[in-house]
Amino acid sequence: MAAIWRGLRFRCPKCGQGRIFRAYLKQADMCDHCGEPLGAIRADDGPAWLTVLSLGPFLVAITFFVSFGHFPLWAALPVAAIAVTGAVLLLLPRIKGAFIAALWVSGLGNGAGEAD
Ligand SMILES: [Zn+2]
């Protein structure tokens, strides 16, 4: 779990010091602290799915808020859209970091041919 916690904080799952991303959602080729080849870990679409799944209850809450709130729809919808977009933008890199860390822990996601 330590590695996944490091991933949530955008840190290298191995040493917890180097950065996992070199830009928003762009994986570093390797850890700048310990040299772990983070770029070899392929997270693919997993983080996006996890983000959608984890936001499910949030989306339901917003739907109820919009449906039963006392706000006019023209005001509630943009606020809801901004809240959802903001939540996705905040969550996605964290979930991706944790996902990369989980792949690193399990040994999955490393490029084929490196098994030897
Ligand atoms: Zn490292």
Image: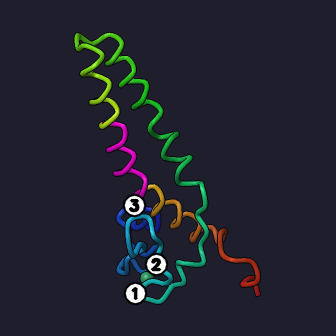
Image spot of residue 91 (x, y percent): 39, 50
Image spot of residue 72 (x, y percent): 25, 13
Q: Main secondary structure of the magenta part?
A: helix
Left or right, 73 with reference to 55: left
Point 33% across, 18% down: residue:
66
Point 45% across, 55% down: residue:
95
Cα separation, mark 2 vs mark 3, equals 15 Å
Left or right, 97 with reference to 42: left
User: What numbered label is drawn on residue 28?
Assistant: 2
Image spot of residue 103 (x, y percent): 59, 66
Amino acid type at circle 2 is Ala
Amino acid type at circle 1 is Asp
**25 falls in the magenta region:** no
Q: Do the residues bearing badges 1 and 3 touch, measured as CB atoms within 8 Å?
A: no
**84 falls in the magenta region:** yes
Q: Give, as a single range, the part of the protein colored magenta.
A: 83-94
Residue at numbered disc 3:
8
User: What numbered label is drawn on residue 102?
Assistant: none
